[in-house]
Structure formats: structure tokens, C-alpha cells
Image (cartoon, grey):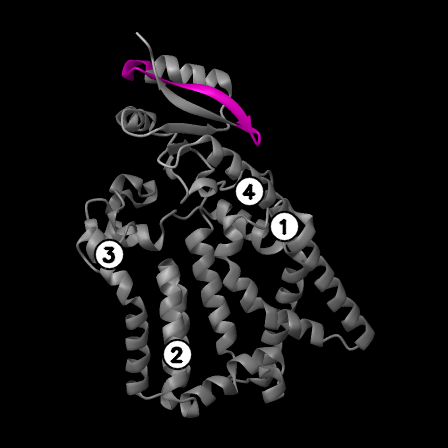
Amino acid sequence: TTYAAYGRHPVTAFCGTPPLAVANGGGNLQLTTGSLVIGFALTVRTAEVGWMFGGALLVWCFYRRESSWSRVALSICAVLVAFFPIFLHNTSLYGNPFYNGYAQIDSDALPAAFAWHLESRFFSTILSLLLPFGIKPLVLLGNIYTYGVWFFWWMAVPTILGLVLYVRAFWRSREPKFVFTLCLLLTATWLFVYYGSWEFRDTTLAGSTIGTSYVRYWLPLFIFGIPYAAYALQSLQNRMMRRGVFVMLFLLSFSVVFFQTPESLVSLYRTAHANRAVTQAVLQKTDVTAVILTERSDKLFFPDRRVIFNDLLDQKKIDRVVAFLADRVPMYYFTELQEHDIDFMNEHRLAQYGVKWSGGGEIGGQRLYQLEKISN
């Protein structure tokens, strides 16, 4: 719609006339609505405030003459109104509207590179928010290549090519319409530095998958890159070649989303269908007042049953909780652990509390145990 309305190529359509149009005649209603949407988005994922605020500030710097301070104040107020429930939530949990779970990070959790800041609670908190995973250049570059280039190479290549072509065109013509490009570079720098040094595996699947956290963390970059990929495609002189490349991009994207990876939509549909059978089987074997201990299957049973996450890194705490609940509610354990692991747990951890896991019927590749008292 923007391209058709302004008759420009995809990049300048985003960063040229539209901001001016909003500044001059967009109306307070549109401004307030857009600010409310941004505020609601930040309530869902406040960690993205860095690049969102930076992008907004960058746009304002270029178009401040077309926007009055009253409209800036209106926009800020709309964001705060949308964010007000989060302030209430933080006050209820932490006693301060500006505190959050990240602000309570223990200084021991900070990267070693920041050890010289540990004497200052202020600096340790700021660093834990801005660089929670430190800076590891080799890990950073590896993740950028794996999830930013290699995994979606058919989109990354035209995006990079389109960016290069656009920058060349900008320097030749000296056009000032490059705000969108600056926003892309700002966002890319922030997201790469913020998340790129994190080493983790949040899936049991081998290799890189579309469900890996980096893909969703860097989703704004994929969206930002679409106009540049379109610009590269538009630069092809041959119409048939342009259409052929477009069809290829569509088919490759469609294949990954629906079929290619273990976390494609078709695979997830099959998994969800199998999980529904597991859920029904477990619900039939457990009382409505029961509490289920599990590692990864909490979403299958909540809210139909109360669920406790089995923290394998703090087994003593879990054992005490299980022993405390033994006389109060029916307790079950749904797990992928093998029988010899359960035997070890019973003999060396739970026996001192006079309870044990028994049963172990297989359901969907896992086992369901019930907590019983050890008879004297």
C-alpha cells in the first residue's frame, strides 16, 4: 500500500514521505493509537525497549522540525498509559514500579568481564540489563552467521545485496532519505550485541531450527530486511528473471515454514496431536486435586492440574517440596528419566523422607509415577 501510494522503491517509501505525513497531518488519534500499540508491545517484551527507543529517537532527530513537543508528550503519555499495569505489577511483586526480575540479579551472575563493577550495585545492575551475557566476539560472530545468514540464506543474500545497492545509490545521489537504513543498522547492532554472545540450547532437537530463540530475538531484523530484498529483486532488469527469483524465494520460505525442519508447522501440528493424547491419558490417571512434577511437559497439564517444574539443578529443594506435599495432595511425576534414575532417586534422596516414586507406566514415550509412602 505504501509503495503504491507514494510511487517509490520499497526503501524510500518507508523512510521518505510517510514520517512527514504523520508529523504534519496524521492526526493525534493516529499518533495516540500507534503509541499505545508500542506501549502494549513493550509490556509483552520490555527488553526490546533499547532499539525501539533508539529508533524512535533517531526518527525524531531527523523530523523534529515537523513535530511539536506537544505531540511528543502525547506519544510518551500514551506509551506510559499502556505500560501502567506493568508498574502496578512490579510494585506488587518488588515494592517499586521500576524494579523487575532482571534488576534483582545477584552480582555473582554477572559475567567475569564485569568483575571490576561488582562493588557498585548501580553499575552491576545497568550492565546486567544492557549486556546480560557479556561480550564474546567469536560466539557473537558465529551466531550472526548461523542464524542471521546461513539459516535463511535465500533471504539474507538479497537483503545484503539490496542494502549495498541502496547505500551506493544514496551516496551517488546524496539523497537524505536514509532514516530507515539507519534504524536498521541501529537495531542490528543492538540485537546482535545484546543476544549474540549467549551460548544456550533451548531445544532438545539437534542443529539449528526455526524455533531456536535467536530466530525470534532477531525477528525485527528479518522484517527490516524485507524492503532491501525487494529493492535487490527490483534491480534485476529481466522481468522473467525477477519473477523466477521471486518464486524461488517464496518456495524456499514456504518449505522451511511448513515442511523442512522438525519445528515446521506440519511437524508442530503432528506433535500437538500426539500431545493431546498424552494429556488426556495423564488426566484420566490423576485426580483433579493432584500435583504433577515434570521437567518439560508442564504446558500439557496446566491449568487442568497443578504443576511443579522439576529443577534438576536444585534437587534438594524439590525433594523437600515433594516430601512436604506427600501428606496433603496426590503427587505424580511425569518424566523422561529412565527407571534406574528413579531407583537412585528413591534410594538416595527420597528414602529419608519416607516416600518413593512407584508405578512408571509409559505414556507417549515418558513415564508416569505416583508418590507413595514407604511401609515400615
CB under 8 Å between callouts 4 and 1?
A: no
Question: Which amino acid lies under the numbered mark 1 shown in the image of this protein?
Answer: Ser
Query: In this view of the protein, can residue 339 be seen by the observer?
Result: yes
Q: Is residue 302 above or below residue 52?
A: above
Q: Position of residue 299 (x, y in %)?
A: 45, 43
The earlier-in-sequence mark between 4 and 3 is 3
Q: CA distance from mark 4 to mark 3?
A: 35 Å
Give the secondary structure at mark 3: helix
Q: Which residue is mark 4?
A: 276
Please tell me how crowded label 1 is: few (under 14), some (14-19), or many (20+) other residues with Cα within 10 Å. some
Q: Which residue is mark 1?
A: 264
Give the residues in magenta: 351-366
Query: Disc 2 or disc 4, which is closer to the eye?
Result: 4
The earlier-in-sequence mark between 3 and 1 is 3
Q: CA distance from mark 2 to mark 1?
A: 34 Å
Q: Indicate which disc residue 140 carries.
A: none
Please tell me how crowded label 3 is: few (under 14), some (14-19), or many (20+) other residues with Cα within 10 Å. some
Taking the spot 39% from the left edge, 37% from the top edge, the residue there is: 288
Please tell me how crowded label 4 is: few (under 14), some (14-19), or many (20+) other residues with Cα within 10 Å. few
Viewer-proximal residue, 120 or 303?
303
Q: Which residue is mark 3?
A: 90
The earlier-in-sequence mark between 2 and 3 is 2
Question: Which amino acid lies under the numbered mark 2 shown in the image of this protein?
Answer: Thr
Q: How many marks do you count on the picture? A: 4
Q: Position of residue 340 (x, y in %)?
A: 48, 15
Question: Which amino acid lies under the numbered mark 4 shown in the image of this protein?
Answer: Arg
